[in-house]
Image (spheres, grey):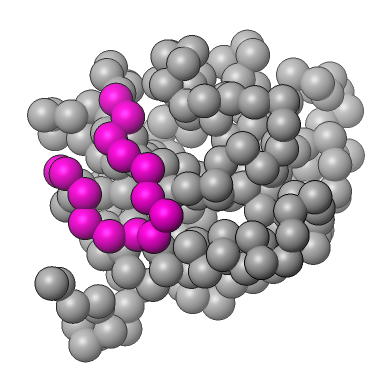
Amino acid sequence: MDIKKARFVTSMAAYGKFSGIGLPQIAVAGKSNVGKSSLINALCRQNKLAKTSATPGKTRLLNVFEINGGTGDAFHLIDLPGYGFAKVDKGEKLRWGEMMQGYFDNSRELRIVLQLVDIRHDPTQDDIDMVSYLRAAGIPFQIVCTKADKISRGSRMKYTAAIGRALQAQPWELICVSSETGEGRDKLIGCIAEAIKMPVEFYEDESQLPEEE
């Protein structure tokens, strides 16, 4: 699979129905300034698809993108609000948390969460909490180490080992990517291709699925 076309669909303050809903969904999560928008642009090879900013906390809504629309590889990419931005007041942080919780509780199409962490830094407590939540909820996730071009290949094992220890994952399970060089793009697309073909399995039975309106 490759990503041949992508378009912005909508932004939402709370997860709900939107045009074209029903395709498999890939969610992108991570702390503010981890490089979510840059990664989305690099995956889709569109520099301005997702808005990037040097200011942390830019993404304050659920942003929906349609990828490969009209093909057998079509899916929605869901850009979740960045968490862990210290300069946001408690009320705003709570609202962001509720927004993401609402998404995880109500999306029937979610296949996997791409959990982004900056390869240069140890995971924050927010990162640890997010991974713990996904693991406890049984939601499939893939840890993605962004900004890999900032660390030499010879030094990476030290950084990925630390990230793996903090997030209870093996270093070889992590995918290292660079939005600048394109490194890791093909491997990540392969992960997405496998995920969109998988059935939803993180509800124990049909009674737990959110009811359709």
- Count of numbered badges drawn on the protein: 0
Query: Is residue 95 left or right of 192 when viewed as pictured?
Result: right
Determine which quarter of the picture holds residue 174: top right
* Image position, residue 133 (x, y; %): 59, 71
Q: Nearer the viewer, residue 91 or 211?
A: 91
Q: Quadrant of the C terminus?
A: bottom left
Query: Is residue 160 left or right of 49 when viewed as pictured?
Result: right
Determine which quarter of the picture holds residue 55: top right
Residue 109 in the image: above or below residue 61? below
Residue 175 in the image: above or below residue 179? below
* Residue under the point 42% across and 21% down: 49
Query: Is residue 22 left or right of 162 when viewed as pictured?
Result: left
* Image position, residue 187 (x, y; %): 49, 30
Residue 68 in the image: above or below residue 142? above
Looking at the rendering, the stretch of residues picked out in magenta corresponds to 7-20
Q: Nearer the viewer, residue 132 or 92?
A: 92
| Residue 50 visible in the snapshot | yes
Determine which quarter of the picture holds residue 71: top left
Is-magenta flag for residue 19? yes
* Residue under the point 15% across and 43% down: 20
Q: Quadrant of the N terminus?
A: top left
* Image position, residue 32 (x, y; %): 69, 43
Is-magenta flag for residue 37? no
* Residue under the point 68% across and 48% down: 31
* Image position, residue 203 (x, y; %): 32, 78
| Residue 193 visible in the snapshot | no
Q: Nearer the viewer, residue 39 or 203?
A: 39
Residue 207 in the image: above or below residue 38? below
* Residue under the point 85% across and 48% down: 122
